[in-house]
Amino acid sequence: MKKGFRRAVMAVAVALSISGAFSPGLVAAEIKFGTVPRLSAPELQAMFNPLTEYLTREIGEKVTLVIPKNFDAVRDMVIAGQMDIGFINPLLYVQIKDKVDIEPLALSSEVKSGTRLRGIIIVRKDSGVTKLQDLKGKKFSFVDEDSPAGHIFQKLLLSKAGFDVKKDIIMMPYGKTHENVTMAVFNKTTDAGGVREEQLDKMKGSLDVSQLKIVGYTDYFPNWPFFSTGKLKKETTDKIRAALLKLKPNDPQNEKILGPARLTGFIPVTDKEYDDLRAAAKLVGAL
């Protein structure tokens, strides 16, 4: 009986060993890659799975996508050490960098905006608004408190134009998406809206954008950064950076890896490039 039990235990051990359960190389902790929950989990998985698979191949360690439940959870997970690398909007980057040491690895390039992005202020053509100064006392819709190109950039633009952004405009409830803000302007539920520069092009098929016009462009700011936390070894961080920078902007070979995420590639970046954004965030109380 005892011999039979020992044989059974050995058989299970061998099976587990064959399956890799006892292999040190396969039980190493996964590298957790987080991004902002701007879409549903299945949509984000579809967008970033090709990139996580590419990074896994390039660095020889398993990279797994983790999706925080909301924007605040992104900060919490990084600070708590529950995320190793991340791809987040530039405002979140400077906010988290202010709390914990994270390292920018690469600057992303998008199909429309490239490596720099800016926001616009839109109104209806029949609104009577022809310049920024006409917006004083008007209803204004923004995407979200922490949206760089759908709030922060526009507030800085208005401030430079002489507005007291706390008194000179009427703040409407946040639209939560660039699409919602655009529709609010189109449907006349707000007088003006702040969205990303390419938003009108994106919505050409869903509404008559010819009825809208742009009355202000913000400055350009660096696009979304890819970053690492202090949890990773320098060797691993260097491998991830090198893998990202191999995906040069506008290289057709990147399409299968980056196309689903609406990216074209990455370029080198330093933290100093986000100093102007820090100033804008402080101006509007976002930092």
Image (spheres, grey):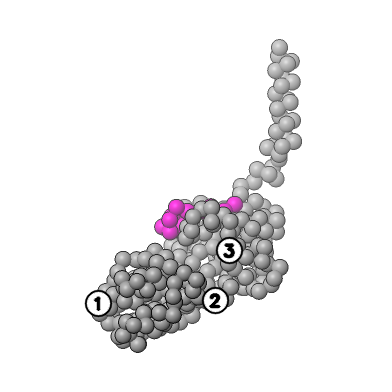
**Residue carrying label 2:** 113
Quadrant where the image shows the C terminus = bottom left
SS for callout 2: loop
Q: Nearer the viewer, residue 108 or 271?
A: 108
Query: At x 59% / y 58%, what residue is drawn?
Result: 48
Mark 1 → mark 2, Cα distance in angstroms: 32 Å
- Residue 156, compared with residue 234, is above or below; it is below
Q: Is residue 67 magenta?
A: yes
SS of the residue at dot 1?
loop
Give the percent coordinates (x, y) of residue 108.
Answer: 58, 70
- Residue in front for this viewpoint, 130 or 279: 130
Which amino acid does the dot numbered 2 rest on? Ser
Q: Where is mark 3, residue-wise?
A: 261
Query: Residue 229's x, y, as percent?
Result: 54, 59
The mark found on residue 167 in the picture is 1
- Above or below for 108 versus 4: below
Whichever of callouts 3 and 1 sits on the residue coming sooner in the sequence is 1
Q: Earlier in the sequence, mark 2 or mark 3?
A: 2
Magenta part of the protein: which range? 64-76
Q: In the rendered structure, which disc, 1 or 2, sits on the residue that comes first in sequence?
A: 2
Q: Position of residue 10 (x, y in %)?
A: 73, 25
**Distance CA(mark 2)–CA(mark 3):** 14 Å
